[in-house]
Image (spheres, rainbow, N blue to C red):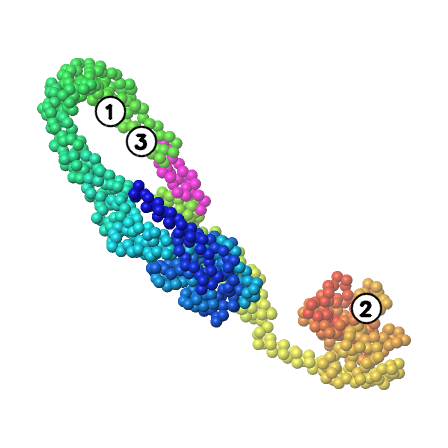
Amino acid sequence: MTLTAPLAVLAVLAGLHFATTLAQSPSASCSGSQPLVGASNTPRSYDGSVGVYNAPWMSPPPASYNSGAGKCITWQYTPATAGNIYFSTCGLTSDDTVLVASTGACTNDFGETMILMLDDTSGCQFRTILSFEATAGTRYFLHMCTYASYYLDPSTAVKLTSGQFIFDFQCPAGMTDHDSLVETACISCTGVQGIYAPVDSRGACSTLLCPAGTSDDDSSSLTPCVACGPGTDTSSPGKYGLCTNFNVPAGKYDHDSNSATAALTCPAGNYAPAAGVLCTPCAAGSWDHDGSSATACVSCASECVAGYYESPGCTPTTNRACATCTPVTSCAASSTTCTSPTTSRCSTCLANFYKVAGPSSDTCEACAAACTTGTFETADCTATSNRVCTACTAISDCDATVSCTSTSNGRCSACASGHYLVPGSTSAQDACAVCETCGVGTFESQACTHATNRNCTQCTPLENCAQVSCTDTTDSVCVQCHAGSFYNTTSQACHACVECASNEFEAIACTFLTDRSCSACANVTNCASVTCTSLDDSVCESCTSTTYMSPNATAGDDEQCLPCAPVAGCAHANVVCTTATDSRCNVAASSADPTVIIVVVVLAALLLIVVLAVLLVKRRQRRNARKSPDATRRSGQTNHPATTMEMLANPLSDHGVQSDNEAYSQVKYSTAAGDSSNLYDTLALGGRPSGSSPRATQEALYDNIRPAPPAEPVYSNTTQTTQAHTLEYEAPKFDSRVVDSTAATSPTYEMATFGEPQYEAPVSAVEAYATGSAPYDTLHRRSAVESPASDGVVYTRVYAASGSNS
């Protein structure tokens, strides 16, 4: 009673004190603020209706705190020791709070120095946690304010409502809040070993012991306890010193490798060394001689020799002892073993005795006598079995007399044909077995004899062989290679035949037993085009110009082209032929002969002289024609004398006269009334004057403009084949067809002769022929004649036989 009564009184006083602290009201100003006392880390109530002062929103605050609009309530706290002040509204109120800490003289409701101001701590939803280190003996003002914007009207500022907050003073490391009251000083745990006093420790120092599994290795309450590893025992709290000081002693072991649990004692028959985690049984052949697991096991006594047995045996807790076995009759010396007095065993009986194993003990029995005639020994007398004699038996398929002795069964000296001997053992007779037959895909590599069976071997596979022959007596032989391959008798394999190169031909064909042989294509003399294939030697397709193809030539001959026979007066290079008898001289090729060139030049000069003479005669005729009466009919025409050079330059044009209807830039053709079979009756130039008849106008027109015919005119087209004709002429007739004078190729004109001259006209363009019995009086064109050649149209200008208009 004397002990519990004072405790009850203290409890009542403490309760009254606690109730008093929770009932303390805050002040609106730091000047009237109340100190925070009572239980630490416990929710406290507040009433915000007294908060009428503006919050200091600036740091440092201005001269006047009236710049803010949040209303505040204030407490004060002076710690007795250094530590950490903790001030929080997180999760305790609905107000949007801002927490402020200030110190120094109370000026304008706040301390003159602002320490910290926080708002909206993460995870607190508009509530705040304010925590900072405090100095012992310093007064701090703690303000709880509502949140507001800058420079609002103080008269409309929002006040705090009501709610709760937590105030706590946390002791520093190495000290503890022994009574959990914020107004009392923390006590030091310095010098107390086996403890750890972190920041915000509470309770007596003795309650801060290092937990099981750890140790205060530096004997300082400021540093954490360290964990001890396997093989140590710190199962009781408050350990201090190095962990090795708590190694599990020999004879115990850390069964779970956890220092926080107590080590277990290792039982007898085992061994546990110091700081061990295992309790190991004594190994085979050793035992715990002192019954302590703290000492190592020792070896048992030596094993018992023959004739003795273990009694007892070697176990982890007992040593081995040996006792004498019960003897076995006829057992060889040192051959008796036992595990008990009634379990004697004999490993080897004496000669001519064999062992008979009993359920618990062995006995040695005498062997039977040797086998008699007509029987043979099928089982010898051994250490564990008696001798057995069996009657001799016949041997099937044996062609000789079967022999039999007391130590061997029947023996055969010659098996029947198709069988071979299978030798028997001492107790087994011989046998004659049927020789093996080689199947498909195998051949006989060893014949069937009396002593050996037939041996069959797989036919050897042959590469690149199209057809293989393998019989029951011969190995694989290739009888047909793939196309393009031949069989090499040396390598006994098919190989690809040689391919002839582009300048070679096949001299020897590729066959089953021969490779292809290639020879170089022969060089053919005087050949312009040679063909050499993979199957044939050189064949000349065409010979050079001075040679011909030999009718007896064969492929590969060098002389397939023979020289042409010479032609008298013709250079050898100009001789051409197709046979030995048709040599001729190539005139075109001979044109380069100097003699021919001289002749051609002379003839051309003579021809030029003739043309000039003709032009002069024609000019004189025109002058005479102007003096004739016919000139009156052509009074409407204007004469334009042409110079000799103009006429020479264009002898086929109409020089000197131009009518109103005549266009020199165009050549016109007309079809006159006449023979309907004629495509062109005549060819004329120019048009018809108005009011005149076609023939009369054309005759008058051409009387004055046509030049005199040449003495011996020659008409030719160098690109056409020519043909000679005799022709009479009549006046040209009007043709309405017009040929464009702007064509790329200028027309070529040809003139007919007077009287009955000879002339040459293009066969492919215009062919002249007679109509009726009269001489040629008109020119006609066959309907079968094709269009003019692409290099130009050939035109023929026709003149009358004389200067008249008839």
60 or 632, which lies in front? 60
Q: Is residue 107 left or right of residue 217?
A: right
Which residue position is annotated with label 3?
A: 455
Q: Which mark is residue 423?
A: 1
- Residue at the limit of the structure toward the right, as seen here: 691
694 or 39, nearer to the observer: 39
Of marks 1 and 3, the one in the foreground: 1
Q: CA distance from mark 1 to mark 3?
A: 18 Å
**Residue at x-position 47% and y-position 60%:** 27
Residue type at numbered disc 1: Pro
Sequence order check: which comes first, mark 2 or mark 1? Answer: 1
State the CA–CA distance, disc 2 to disc 3: 112 Å
Secondary structure under the numbered disc 1 in the rendered image: loop
At x 58%, y 67%, the residue is 585
Q: Residue at x 71, y 74 (%)?
A: 746
**Element type at marker 2?**
loop
First reached walking from the N terminus: tag 2 or tag 3: 3
Residue 205 visible, this angle: yes
In screen coordinates, is 718 left or right of 47? right
Whole-percent x, y for residue 172 in the image: 33, 57
Which amino acid type corresponds to the residue marked 3 in the rendered image? Answer: Asn
Disc 2 marks which amino acid? Asp
Q: Is residue 470 magenta?
A: yes
Q: Percent from the top left, x then y, of residue 680?
A: 80, 67
Quadrant of image for the C terminus: bottom right
C-beta proximity under 8 Å, tags 2 and 3: no
Residue at which label 2 appears: 681
Magenta region's main secondary structure? Answer: loop
Residue 41, percent from left and from top = 40, 53
Which residue is nearer to you in this view: 168 or 694?
A: 168
Q: Which residues are magenta?
A: 460-484
